[in-house]
């Protein structure tokens, strides 16, 4: 049975149509096969099974920016702190690249790049993050994490080869959930509308990653750099011994703020549960 709900009309989180479970989405959409090609060049790295489930006790939120700085970073940190308080993990936020050492990173189950921009780590700090992931560490990227470290090939692979290219003006678009049996999407309707800054990428990550959600470009103006009928905006993959999860959503501060208005609160709940599922998956405690 299909259920169509209206959520947050007029506030960007518009209409959602969903079945009663994940079956609707999987029946409607063809899941992405692995093994496609990816522009931008994949190395010889082969995906390995993620390590056994670990605990989710501590996350690092990295918010250093060498380029554009999003106003939503502050609310984003607070939202992740709230997720930690509600779910039993500690949240440490830093702007300090020096945190990227073997000893310091070992304290964290997941490292989150929250709208980082530009060249934020030096070569030694980059090597520390690579070792962290190879040792089974989890990485989460939010929004401008793909507008970061363009000249670091390993990082390019971490993000599925999908560096930020461009974005049109903030507008409302329809998102299709392609993989509903994932911790970061199971709570979402099969299709919903959201107002946000919607990224175009330099390459389509499909084939390198498992795509969770796509944008329907027929429902908004993607502008220069439009990606056409296959426009991923959230994905994950086992990568180089660890786990990497990314969502391109999260430009607008409203997405991270609890609000007494029911529609805004619905949008907040949707988005923060999306993030929580990504963090839990990256930590290896959810599938
Ligand atoms: Zn943005």
Image (cartoon, grey):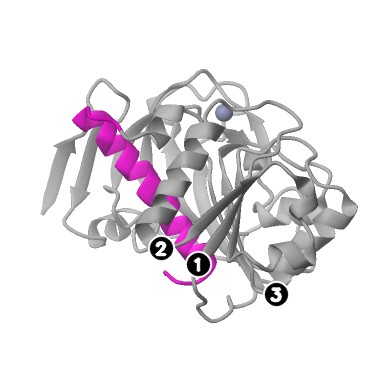
Q: Position of residue 63 (x, y in %)?
A: 64, 40
Using the image, determine if residue 135 lies above or below residue 251: below
Residue 201 at least partly seen: yes
Q: For the residue with label 2, is its CB less than 8 Å from the closest atom of ligand 1?
A: no
Marker count (numbered): 3
Residue 17 left/right relative to 248: left
Relative to 139, is 107 above or below? Answer: below
Between marks 1 and 3 in the image, the one whose residue lies nearer the viewer? 1
Q: Residue furthest top?
A: 169
Quarter of the N terminus within the rendering = bottom left
* Mark positioned earlier in the residue sequence (3 or 2): 2
Cβ–Cβ below 8 Å for labels 3 and 2?
A: no
**Residue 266: % across, % down:** 25, 37
Q: Main secondary structure of the magenta part?
A: helix
The residue identified by callout 3 is 135
Q: Earlier in the sequence, mark 1 or mark 3?
A: 1
Position of residue 238 measured from the top left corner of the image (x, y, whole percent): 60, 68
Earlier in the chain: of badge 1 and badge 2, it is 1
| Magenta stretch in the rendered image | 259-287
Report the Cα–Cα distance between label 1 and label 2: 7 Å
Structural crowding at the residue carrying mark 3, measured as other residues with C-alpha within 10 Å and reported as few (<14), some (14–19) or many (≥20): some
Mark closer to the observer (3, 2): 2
What is the distance, in whole Å, between disc 3 and disc 2 at their CAs? 23 Å
Query: How far from the left and from the top, in percent, is residue 185?
Result: 36, 54
Q: Which residue is mark 1?
A: 57
Q: Are marks 1 and 2 in contact (CB under 8 Å)?
A: yes
Q: Nearer the viewer, residue 177 or 226?
A: 177
Q: Is residue 266 left or right of residue 78?
A: left
Residue located 33% across and 38% down the image: 268
Q: Secondary structure at mark 3?
A: loop
Residue marked by disc 2: 88
Judge the density around disc 2: few (<14), some (14-19), many (≥20) Cα neighbours within 10 Å. Answer: few
């Amino acid at each position: 049975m299909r259920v169509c709900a209206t959520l947050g009309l007029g506030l960007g989180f518009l209409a959602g149509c969903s079945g009663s479970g994940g079956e609707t989405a999987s029946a409607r959409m063809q899941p992405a096969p692995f093994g496609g090609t990816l522009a931008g060049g994949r190395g010889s790295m082969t995906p390995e099974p993620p390590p056994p489930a670990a605990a989710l006790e501590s996350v690092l939120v990295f918010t250093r920016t060498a380029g554009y700085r999003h106003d939503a970073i502050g609310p984003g940190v607070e939202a992740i702190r709230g997720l930690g308080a509600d779910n039993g993990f500690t949240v440490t936020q830093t702007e300090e690249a020096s945190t990227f050492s073997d000893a310091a990173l070992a304290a964290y189950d997941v490292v989150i790049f929250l709208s980082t921009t530009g060249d934020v780590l030096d070569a030694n700090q980059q090597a520390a993050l690579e070792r962290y992931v190879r040792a089974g560490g989890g990485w989460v990227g939010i929004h401008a994490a793909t507008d970061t470290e363009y000249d670091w090939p390993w990082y390019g692979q971490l993000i599925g080869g999908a560096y930020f290219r461009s974005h049109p003006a903030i507008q409302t678009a329809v998102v299709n959930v392609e993989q509903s049996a994932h911790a970061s999407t199971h709570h979402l309707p099969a299709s919903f509308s959201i107002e946000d800054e919607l990224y175009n990428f330099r390459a389509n990550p499909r084939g390198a990653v498992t795509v969770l959600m796509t944008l329907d470009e027929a429902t908004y103006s993607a502008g220069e750099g439009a990606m056409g009928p296959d426009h991923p905006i959230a994905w994950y993959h086992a990568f180089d011994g660890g786990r990497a999860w990314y969502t391109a959503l999260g430009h607008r501060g409203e997405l991270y703020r609890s609000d007494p208005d029911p529609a805004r609160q619905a949008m907040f709940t949707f988005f923060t549960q999306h993030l929580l599922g990504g963090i839990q998956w990256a930590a290896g405690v959810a599938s």
